[in-house]
Image: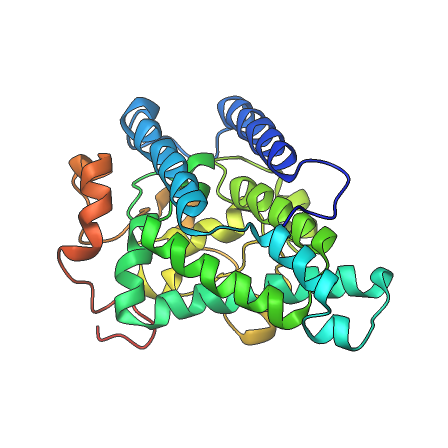
Amino acid sequence: MASSLPFDETTVRLSIFATILVVMALAEAAWPRRERTLPRLTRWPSNLAVVVLDSLLVRLVFPMTAVAVAALGEARGWGLLNVMQVPAWIAVPVAVIVLDLVIYLQHVMFHAVPTLWRLHRMHHADLDFDVTTGSRFHPVEIMLSMVIKLTVIAALGAPALAVLIFEVLLNATAMFNHGNLRLPLWLDRWVRLLVVTPDMHRVHHSVVVRETNSNFGFNLSVWDRMFGTYRDQPEAGHDGMAIGVETIRDPAEQRLDRMLTQPFRGSDRRYPVAGRD
């Protein structure tokens, strides 16, 4: 089914993704927060190749995009917001906020369940933290995430416009808060009251388990504060902290073939929430 939006969803999303990627890459070069562990050419080809692979698999496996499912729900009256006939000016922001909460809870789940952590671990195994890390997710994790997202959209009755706004915000904020970007401390303190900043999310990519299991938010920062998973700063400081997973430190693991097989090799019993030390 075609989207009810008056423009092409794919064009909008790709244009915004490419624009933010370029802007963030330039900003990282101008105002870096940390020195790189590895050269960009060692990491970026694999990280960006994962984005392409994930996008192709989503297109092949799922006949409809999230926005198209929302449009179909609107046309057929599916979901809570449609059944309750909530006006659009309320339904759109409510749906965006609920979907953001779902992403937070999903992220916690991928840290809490050992099998899911093995998939999510590929995202954390990046030895550096920059704009490309924000799109580095294992294809199986992307497939599971898509199933969860489509189910919630249909059950909630999220408007197509809300889903598009959410998708754009999620991609944009994921690239922003994974940026190797130095924000003035005063600006960081104010911005993180609303959205997740690079300094806030970088703590989540620490090799230290208790820091890895904090700051799960991707967009709104309120969820970490509300559910008690917020951590202000890493113990070693942003310059001294080690990024990644303790058991995956070989630079060869940044190759695409090694990244894709990481869930099926090794074990990290300490990292899942409530895991053993």
Q: Residue 186: percent from the left, percent from the top?
A: 67, 45
Looking at the picture, tell me which residue is in the foreground, 56 or 187: 56
Q: Residue 86: percent from the left, percent from the top?
A: 83, 71
Screen quadrant of the C terminus? bottom left
Residue at point 27% right, 70% down?
Answer: 114
Residue at point 70% right, 76% down?
Answer: 80
Residue at point 78% right, 65% down?
Answer: 91
- Residue lying farthest to the left in this orientation: 266
Looking at the picture, tell me which residue is in the foreground, 125 or 82: 82
Q: Is residue 92 above or below residue 65?
A: below
Q: Is residue 15 above or below residue 227?
A: above
> Is residue 133 found left or right of 104 in the rendered image?
left
> Is residue 39 found left or right of 89 in the rendered image?
left
Residue at point 31% right, 22% down?
Answer: 41
Q: Residue 178: percent from the left, percent from the top?
A: 48, 43
Quarter occupied by residue 13: top right
> Is residue 95 found left or right of 140 in the rendered image?
right
